[in-house]
Each structure stands twice: as C-alpha cells, then as structure tokens.
Amino acid sequence: MALLAAGGGAMVFAWNEDGSAASFQDGITAMPPDPHPAQPSITASLTTINISAASLNLPEQKTKVFSLLGITWNDPKDAPDGTVQVRTHSIATGKWSGWQVLSAGEGGADSAEGSHARGATEPLWVGASDGVAARIVPADGSAATALPAGLRLDMIDPGRSGGRGGGEPDPSASASSDIPEISDSSSPATTEPTTEPTTEPTTAPTTTAPTTAPTTTAPTTTAPTVAPTTTLPMPTSTAPLETPLPSYVSRAAWSADETLVTESMSYASEVRVLFVHHTAETNNYSCADSPAIVRAIQKYHVKSNGWADIGYNFLVDKCGTLFEGRRGGVTKAVIGAHTYGFNTSSAGIAVLGNYSTTGSPEPAEKTIAQVAAARLGAYKYNPATVGQLTENAPDGKFKQGQVVDFQRISGHRDGVATECPGNNLYARLPAIRALAVNMVSGLAAQPFGGGGSLVSGVYYARGVVTVNWSVATPSNLLSRFEILLDGQVAGVAPPTWRAFNVAVPAGKHAIAIRAVQLYGATSVTGSSAVFSDVSVPFFSSAPGVLLRGGTYSATSAPVAVTYRATDNVQVGSLAVTSPSKTGLSPTSTYWNTAVRPSANTTFTLTAKDWAGNARTASVARKAVPLAETSAKRAGTWTARSGSSYLGGKALATTKKNSKLTWTFTGRSAALLFSRAAKTGKADIYLDGKKIATVDTKGATAYRQGLWVRALTPGKHTVTVTALATGGRPTVVSDGLFYIP
C-alpha cells in the first residue's frame, strides 16, 4: 500500500495478493472493445523523458511540442516524496513559465484495469510548449529520497487544436464558430467547439397562439433576471425525474483514439451516485482548446496511468460544454476510474480546471446539474435523495465492504481522501443538487396539429403548424417555452401553454420546443421535420366519363370516370364526393361505376396533398340509349322480343353484309349484342372506316357492351356489318349507348 501526497490530495493503491482488484459488486457486465476501431481524425502523441538520476532535478531543455504533461512511475505504491514541480517554455510567448505544482493523482481504477496501472501525478495543461524543466521539492526541507523506479516525464501533444493547445495551428479553425448549445442528447455535437459560448437570442418574431391555448399574453424572450448565486428551492418531493441529457461533444467529435481502448469496459446495472471532480490543472485555458485537453487527458490516462480508457464518464469545461468520456458511458452505467473504491454504480464528471481557490463557473454547474438529472433520472433516482454504494477498495477511506450513504450528487472527497473537486466547487454542490432537481423534466413533443399529415416522419402543413407538447415540471416552476424553427426562436409561449401556432416558410424545416425553467435551466425536445406547402393540387387531366364494357339495362349503364390528379409534392388523398362518397387511390386515373340511363349525373372529385391543400373538380354526363329500331337498316333483319332484351326487343340477322347504322353526336359509344354458343362475328365501322371485328360467341348473355369507344366529341356514325360466320352466322343487335 502507498500514499501519494505530492502537492495536496492523496490516492491510495492496494491489490489482493494475486494482483487483482477486490470487488464486492454483482451484476457486472463486460462490453468488449471494438474489434475494428476507427482511426481518430486527430491523433495525440506521447513523448517521454526517462529520469534515472538519484534525485529529480531536470534542467531546462528543448523538447518536441506538447501541451499537457505529468510525472509517472512503475509502482503506484512507490510515490515520490515531496512536491513535484515543472516549468515549461511557451511557444506563444517564447518565455519560460514559473514553477507549477503537479498535483497528486486523484483518480483510481478499483477494477481489474488497476492491476497494471502506473503511479502518476495529475496531468497539467500548459498550452503549446517546446521546453521543460522539473524538480521535486522535499517536504519540510527534508533531504531528498530515492526516486521510484521507472520515473519519467510524460508530455502529450493533442494534435491540431487551433494553434493554442499543442501541435501546429489548424488553418480550418474558425474564431467565430459557436460551441454546441446544451440541448437534447439525441444529436450529439459533431464538430469541435472553437469559441466561448454566445448568449441566447433575446427577441423572437411575433407569432399568434392557437385558439385552443390560453389567452395569456406571451412573455418576451428575455432571460429571467435571477442572479447566478440565487439560492434555488429544494423541492420536498423525492419522485424520480425524467430529464434528457444535454447535447454533448461525442468521442468522435473530440477525436477520441479508439485504438487505445483494447480492454473490455465493465458496466453495472445502474448509476446511483454522480461524483463531481476537477482535473486540478490550470484554469487559464480557452474553451476552444477543450477538445484538445480532453484528447490529451485520454492519452495520459491510457498511456501514462495505464487505464483502459479515459477515467471520467463525462467532462465539462468552464463554458459548460459537455464532453463524452469513457466509452459507453452516455447510455450505460460504465465503471470508470475516477473515485477509488466507488467506481461501480457511479458516474464521474470532471470540470476542466482547478477550483481549490478559483470560483466554480456557473455554466459548468448548470451542465453538471443537467447530467445528474439525466443519468440519475434514467434509473428513477431523484438528485435530491441519498444513494448507497459499497466500498470496493481494501485500503480506501471506508472499511472494505462497508455500505456508505452518499448524496446522489457528491464530491470526489466524499468517497476518497482528497481535496478534489476543490473547496469552491465542493461548496457549490448543494446549489447544484437544487438546480438538478429544478431541471425541466418530462418535456416531450406531441403530434403536430393544423390539418396536415405525417408521412414517413415528416409533417406536411399549409404554412402554419400547431406545435403541441407536454411537460412534467409544474408551470409555476417554468419561465416560458420557446418554439425553435431550424434552431432559431420563432415564437415564445407562456409557461401554462401546451400548444402554439407557428408560421413555417415554404419547404422543409425542423421544429423543436425548448422549455426554460425559472432559474434558467433548459430542456429541448428532439427536432421534428416539417414541410410547409401552400400549393394546391390540380387535375392535369380533367374528370371525364366514358362508357365501358359490361351488362347494360334500363336502369344501369357501366361507365368509367377518368381523371389525373397532380401536386407539386405529392397527392395525399383522392376521393369521389358526389354522387356518392368513395375513396380512390391518389395515383389512380379512373374509377369504374354505373349510371342510370338518360339521367344527368354529376361526378365531383376532391384531391388533397399531404399538407391538406385541396382542389375539387366536377363533370356532368348522361348515358343515352339508342334502340336498334332507330338504326338505318340494310340487308335482312328479323325482330326478336323478350324481357331479356333492352326495351323488350332486338334485331337479328344471318345474312352477310346486313347492316345497322346509328348517327349521333357524342364523345363515347357502346354497341350492345346478345351472346350465345352459335352467334357469330360482325365488323364495326366508325365514320365509314372499319376499326374492329367483334365475335359475339360466348356463354348466353344479353345486353352486352362488346364494343366501346372513346370518341372525339362531335357527330359520328357507327355501323354493324354481319359477316355470316360459317356454322354460326347469327348476329343479334340490342342497340347502342352514347354519351353526348
């Protein structure tokens, strides 16, 4: 067992006799490493200086470029005595810094990954440097003792980082880019933040509220004037919260080196406690360098400390930007290396910087509260309550196996003998707990209204969308709701409203709802796709009516209503609304129905697009019968009578070239025949030109429309000429129908 106490703080290492870490938790699951990890877009590099002298007194010397450094040694139990100090040569200023203390290593793996850990100080971020000096100042002026074996100086260059965090300047870095806004975790940030956070918009376009919402005047979008240090009320309810994780910079976005993660990650069944840490390094960093700092910390934790991955589950900078930490920790209770003895069933979040003497930044406190509400709420725990963890270290702050009560949001020092997370940040934990409990919970978007329709995940609307939502947080704890259109505030609703009408420009857009709590905490729903369309469908082919084949009678004539509906996006629905109501396929071009002969019938069709824009078109037509007796005859025709014939009569012939000719003015015609096993063929002439031959042979049937034709509107003649087919010469005509 060894105690490392250089520069304040302490960390104790101990292992079972077989070299493995002791464990008292059940239900641990292993998550194997990615067998084919992607190469990082930016790679951090490690340079070391081995120190084999009897004492540490490394004079100033030039080095490769680095931005973060620390001292490490072989055996964690054999820490160097005294305070480790370093000086670095700044590339930006060309000057040497003063002596800076390397704090004692305050993290610790208490699982199997700790069995191959090295002893190490906490890393120190110094910015882009190319020179170093190091020394150990003995405690109380005592004589220097022998250095531990394997002592070395580890220097890490995080790679491209805008020219301030090590490596060469990045010409693509923009000084005006915004850091990711804290919002819904469904879409983690994918690019490195490059500037300090900007303030939210303070004005919004004027937008009317829906008639179903309260008539309360919408408030302005000015943020509440509550001072940052205002004490938040601690609700007495211990009910669990459901709060989304704020948006975060993903591992891919900060260029985590997944090739370093070669061991399985273990995770527990739940997160019961969130431990708050600070990284105990400089506060003099730009938030633009935060991704590089996180990248360097990962390299240090893996290559210097000897851990499986970065030790923290989350990291947050002084601007409040959240970074994904150890792989899998966003959604799983991944066991980290942050609170020795209590890593299982807990999560660790580290604030970049040292808050022993510097006040903790409000944006970081807000992010910690959001993470606490989200990760604890995911397992039905309220951040204001107490959780229990089991001491898993044989040489920890508590007796091994002891069940310890912790505030759900605790400081590192609550579980380990350390100064972390610094007096100032630790003093803010009660306020952070109150803020976590006061987070907006249960915010959820509800289906849009406004007469549109949802198709394949996109809501189509006619210019105005009724945005609906629900929220679990009581209205009296809320300031307002902001309707975000493509990320910008398009409307502001009072805290009692749950619906709002917002005008949406033509085309595809994204809508989200942001709830703002009285003390400034926010929650944002995921974005929903909306397509605004005010164009009305049209009929590229106007409705028409044509006769069709089938059985005719004195009360029914089969017809086809023809049409073609078109829209600039998509016809969503098509229907006949008169003379009856019938739904049609939006892509159909005809509808088969029947009409009463000689009666004028109006057909009305309505086409709607997905947004609800509609157009109606009508056509009025009638089917007129012409009896066979009204035709001009040529040759020999014999009258037949019977109830099966149209009007009780028909004409038949067995003679070749016997003819019946009708003259009419119309746009569609149908010739009717009787069918039988012995009936024969006839030629059909239209306006004097042969256009078809009809064979009337078939199963016995009457009044059959065997020839139908769409015609150019106007005057026409149709002639039937019998062919006296051998063995079945008979042709029986039952008249003609036409549509004027």
Image: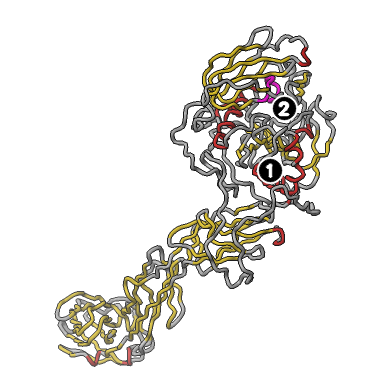
Q: Which of the 4 quarters of the picture holds residue 371?
A: top right
Q: Is residue 332 visible?
A: yes
Q: Which residue is at 75% across, 42% downward?
A: 429
Start and end of the magenta stretch?
Answer: 107-122
| In this view, 732 is above or below 407 | below
Check disc 2 and report the residue beneath it.
106
Residue at image location 84% in from the left, 36% down from the top: 403
Q: Is residue 228 left or right of residue 718?
A: right
CA gap between label 2 and label 1 equals 21 Å
Give the farthest residue toward the top. 54
Residue 394 in picture, x, y percent from top left:
81, 25
- 328 left or right, relative to 700: right
- Point out which mark residue 365 bears: 1
| Quadrant (top left/top right/bottom left/bottom right) for the N terminus | top right
**Label 1 is placed on what type of residue?**
Glu
Give the secondary structure at mark 1: helix
